[in-house]
Image: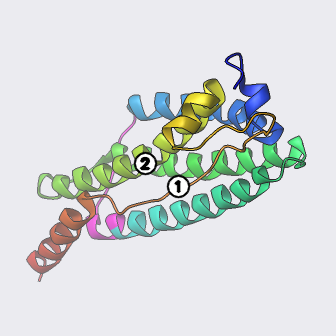
Amino acid sequence: MNRDMNSESILSQPSMVLGDCIRPVASGMRARMESRPSRSLPIEDVLGFVDHHLKQITLNVNCLIVEINRLGRLIKDADSPESAVHRGATGIETHLERLLDDYDEVRQAVLAYADSEGRRLLERVYRETLIQIRRLLDDIVAGRNDPKGALEKRGLTIEEGKRQPIRLDLVMEAPPSINVLERWIWSRGHADR
């Protein structure tokens, strides 16, 4: 095997384009998660707020998964046009921005002291979900930066002269904090009765 293999000799063209498109998305996501929104948003109906956000996060994550799967099928085809890969990456970025906007809204929420635990738990659900997505984006960028290392990490062999697609396999798991939030919702709902 040629030790001088670079991403151009290992990765398919659509995979290289994807890695280049995802790099700024991953960087922007990291910066956004590390920053704190400055304005506050007073919330009166905490249960309604939490319910709305649980529906939103489910919808946005499902849309993101569909977009990632579509893009994954697209980059398996070495003849996929760059413009299609760009559109797919833009779709991922759009759904991710919606998730980040909602995450910011939760972090901006100002609730009565008794309800602050619900906001904290909802924020944790978002953060744990976003971290799972960020890992996938970081893997894509790492695959573009060091395709040989990324393939070996996945236990895949590199065949001389055969270009590999970056595999997109986002497996979302329910964040551990969702169970704690659901218990909080139940207890908070019963406290109002």
Please tell me which residue is depicted at 47% across the width and 31% down the height of the picture: 30
Q: What residue would you read off at disc 2? A: 132
Residue contact at pointers 2 and 1, CB within 8 angstroms: yes
Q: Amino acid at mark 1?
A: Leu
Q: Nearer the viewer, residue 166 or 60?
A: 166
In terms of depth relative to the viewer, which is nearer, 149 or 65? 149
Task: Name the image quarter holding the C terminus.
Answer: bottom left
The amino acid type found where label 2 is placed reads Gln
Q: Is residue 134 above or below residue 148?
A: below
Residue 161 located within the stretch drawn in magenta: no
Element marked by disc 1: loop
Locate residue 65, reporting x and y percent. Answer: 58, 61
Say which label, 2 or 1, has the lower sequence index: 2
Residue assigned mark 1:
170
Read off the magenta span: 39-50
Q: Quadrant of residue 177?
A: bottom left
